Amino acid sequence: MRLVQYLDGDRQGVGVLRGEEVIATGYADMLTFISDGEHALDQARQSLATGRPIRYDKLLAPITNSGKIFGSGANYLGHGQEDPDWVPAGEPQWDFIKLTSSVTGPYDDIVIPPADDVIKRGPGSKAKFAEESGFAVDYEVEFGVVMGKTAKNVRREDAYDHVFGYTIINDAGSRSVQFHFGQRDLGKNFDTFCPMGPCIVTRDEIPDIRQVRIEAYVNGELRQSELISDQLNLPDVAIEWLSSIIRLDPGDILSTGTPAGCGTFMSPPRFLQPGDIVRCTATGIGHIENRVVQGTARTHQVSEVGRLPV
């Protein structure tokens, strides 16, 4: 099944897709649906068979209240090798956490805040890329694995039994924050920097995820393309690795790394600009598409900015 979250006025719900139509399941949010296990899936199957399509205002990210979203370091050889400073770790790399406040819908805007407000990134800044590119925002298409059961000390041969389904993530980030004194978590967690969706495809729909291809396009230009089989460590390895340290709960998400082709490592670098459109796709799941816009919300008025510390 293909499951979505939708908004109709001020009412949120979980729907199951029948072609392009959305059928209500009776659940208000995806985390509750996932936590309800087989009962929820049975309800969705019944809705799919007998329900009528609903009208709604917009699709939300398919899950908006995960407890934890784990971000992978270099998990494709090509992505690691495009960074001249990369040193292979010899073990799975899970370098940061994405917060739910960064999650946005599959077709919502990616908002770059003013770079001359509290955090200054522009002329005169010592942060990498900031002088020419402000926040230096980059895209990263990633395959998202959504947990369906609690997992603690799970062996890799049993790992997929704990998976609910799969989705698409654009792990956007500000390189001039991420690379400045190692502030990876901050750089990855600007509001709107985690577009996700358009749905969660249940695990049974994609029996061999190794054949899934993920791709990223910027303004129609193909930038990234790779099979999941090319990952250095597949999701079963990640689940074994992470669950040996941290309990994974239903609704937790593993964002499993990005292929080569990020703007950061092009010559010269090509960071996202207002007006750009980023489209991320995955075989068997669909696509998300997000326009980049310049945000205007500020902490300090322009006349005050000159008095702030750099």
Image (spheres, grey):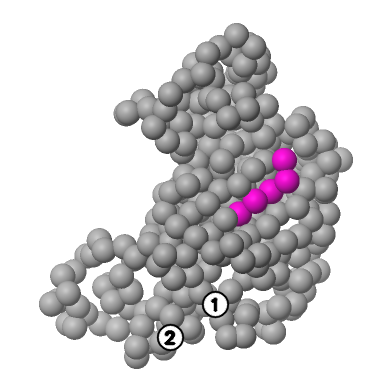
Residue 117 x %, y %: 26, 73
Quadrant occupied by the C terminus? bottom left
Main structural element of the magenta stretch: helix, strand or loop? strand
Q: Which of pointers 1 and 2 indicates the residue nearer the eye?
A: 1
Residue 227 x %, y %: 79, 56
* Residue 275 appears in the picture as rendered: yes
Q: CA distance from mark 1 to mark 2?
A: 11 Å
Relative horizontal placement of residue 143, taking residue 68 as reference (left or right):
right
- Judging depth in this view, the residue of 29 and 222 nearest the camera is 222
At 67% from the left and 71% from the top, the residue drawn is 261
Residue ranking furthest to the bottom: 124
Quadrant occupied by the N terminus? top right
Q: Which residue is mark 2?
A: 132
Q: Amino acid at mark 2?
A: Glu
At 40% from the left and 67% from the top, the residue drawn is 274
Residue 280, image quadrant = bottom right
Residue ranking furthest to the left: 303
Q: Which residue is mark 1?
A: 270
Disc 1 or 2, which lies upstream in sequence?
Answer: 2
- Judging depth in this view, the residue of 135 and 37 nearest the camera is 135
Relative horizontal placement of residue 310, taking residue 267 as reference (left or right):
left
Q: Amino acid at mark 1?
A: Arg
Residue 146, image quadrant = top right
Magenta stretch: give its range.
Answer: 280-284
Q: Secondary structure at mark 2?
A: helix
Residue 148 x %, y %: 66, 32
